[in-house]
Image: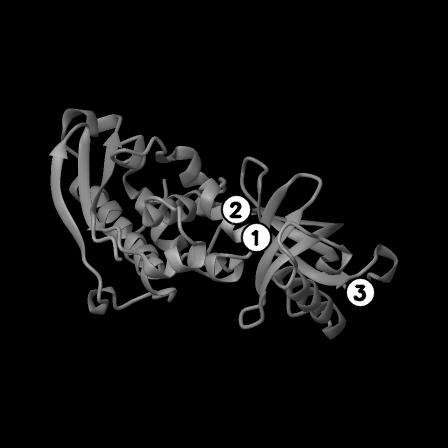
């Protein structure tokens, strides 16, 4: 039985000029427009399992801007709870499925942990980690642009649904995280659990067993075929494992550099070699991530972004 319950999602701009119940038109509407793009991508994925990056007006999906209201200053979006793909993948018992996915995508895009329910389902394979990673990557430009009103009319954007205690918070710190990157050319090697890999774009997820933290990674073009085979075999072993059981076949020793946030958090790993054991690791020439120590990332698809 499908759940067509309508959900109201509130996007509340707080602090700064928004406390007077008015906001600069351009930045506020830019944030709202970007928010609508991100929401449509996430909700469409929850319903179909497919990722769409453009032509949103052609989707068989209804996302309404119900009202704007003072409060400090709020946009209210309305959409159907109906999420057949996500419910089928997760199984019964996931309340507010679309909201849990929205929470996960926004939080992971800004360097935080996602919904406990979604991340547990990702860890045990009910939700495909590669697909979820691809969705987060696809929505990142919209989540980034949703910060337009930060420091330009408001200091915080809070996103929530009635009846759920969790709130997504966008602020100056998350804006800096999304817009600025430190390209860290320090070479490191470490053993990871390979939880997913997408051979189409050579990206995936690695889990640090010591820190108990997952990282998105790119397998660089400099990596040889042996490295690719190690990553693919480990990801396959992880996908085929029995629930709750792990072994060394799911692990890989990776040599990598990284893209870091200004506060030191690791945003993304750049893997250029992989092996089963440390003594089998063939590093070769270490690729330069960039010659610049720090720079704003290339967001050429984000015309009109307000970065400051």
The residue tagged with tag 1: helix, strand or loop? loop
Residue 63 relative to residue 247: left or right: left
User: Which numbered disc, 3 or 1, marks the residue closer to the eye?
Assistant: 1
Please name whichever residue, 139 or 124, is drawn nearer the observer in this view of the structure: 124
- Classed neighbour count for the residue bearing mark 2: other residues with Cα under 10 Å, few (<14), some (14–19), many (≥20): some
Write down the residue under mark 3. 284
The correct choice, above or below, for 186 with respect to 271 in the image is above
Give yes or no for contact between labels 3 and 1 (Cβ–Cβ under 8 Å): no
Image coordinates of residue 250 in percent, x first then y, are 71, 58
Residue 182 x/y as whole percent: 57, 45
Distance, label 2 to label 1, CA atoms, is 6 Å
- Residue at 26% over, 57% down: 2
Q: Residue at x 54, y 73 (%)?
A: 200
Q: Residue 124 carries which label?
A: 1
- Quarter the C terminus occupies: top left
**181 above or below 174?**
below
Sooner in the amino-acid sequence: mark 3 or mark 2: 2
| Residue matched to label 2 | 120
Say which residue appears at 44% left-offset and 42% top-offset: 115
Residue drawn at x 31%, y 56% is 83
Q: Which is closer to the viewer, label 3 or label 2?
A: 2
Q: Which of marks 3 and 1 is nearer the N terminus?
A: 1
Q: What element carries label 3?
A: loop
Residue 219 locus on image (x, y percent): 63, 64
* Residue 258, visible in the rendered structure: yes
């Amino acid at each position: 039985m499908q759940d067509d319950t309508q959900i109201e999602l509130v996007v509340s701009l707080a602090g700064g000029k928004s406390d007077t119940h008015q906001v600069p038109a351009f930045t506020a509407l830019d944030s709202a427009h970007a928010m609508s793009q991100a929401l449509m991508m996430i909700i469409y994925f929850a319903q179909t399992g497919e990722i769409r990056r453009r032509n949103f007006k052609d989707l068989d999906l209804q996302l309404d801007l119900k009202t704007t209201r003072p409060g400090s200053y709020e946009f209210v979006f309305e959409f159907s709870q109906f999420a057949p793909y996500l419910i089928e993948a997760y199984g019964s018992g996931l309340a507010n499925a679309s909201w849990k996915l929205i929470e996960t995508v926004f939080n992971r895009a800004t360097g935080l942990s996602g919904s406990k329910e979604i991340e547990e389902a990702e860890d045990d394979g009910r939700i495909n980690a590669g697909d979820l990673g691809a969705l987060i990557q696809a929505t990142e430009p919209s989540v980034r642009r949703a910060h337009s009103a930060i420091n330009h009319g408001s200091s915080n954007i809070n996103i929530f649904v009635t009846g759920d205690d969790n709130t997504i918070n966008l602020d100056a710190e998350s804006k800096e995280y999304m817009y600025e990157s430190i390209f860290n050319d320090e070479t490191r090697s470490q053993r990871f659990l390979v939880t997913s890999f997408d051979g189409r774009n050579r990206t995936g997820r690695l889990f640090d067993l010591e820190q108990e933290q997952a990282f998105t990674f790119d397998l660089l073009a400099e990596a040889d075929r042996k490295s690719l085979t190690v990553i693919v075999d480990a990801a396959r072993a992880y996908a085929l494992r029995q629930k709750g059981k792990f072994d060394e076949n799911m692990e890989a020793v990776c040599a990598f550099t990284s893209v870091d946030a200004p506060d030191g958090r690791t945003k993304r790993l750049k893997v250029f070699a992989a092996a089963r054991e440390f003594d089998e690791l063939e590093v070769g020439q270490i690729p330069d991530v960039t010659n610049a120590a720090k720079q704003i990332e290339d967001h050429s698809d984000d015309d009109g972004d307000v970065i400051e």
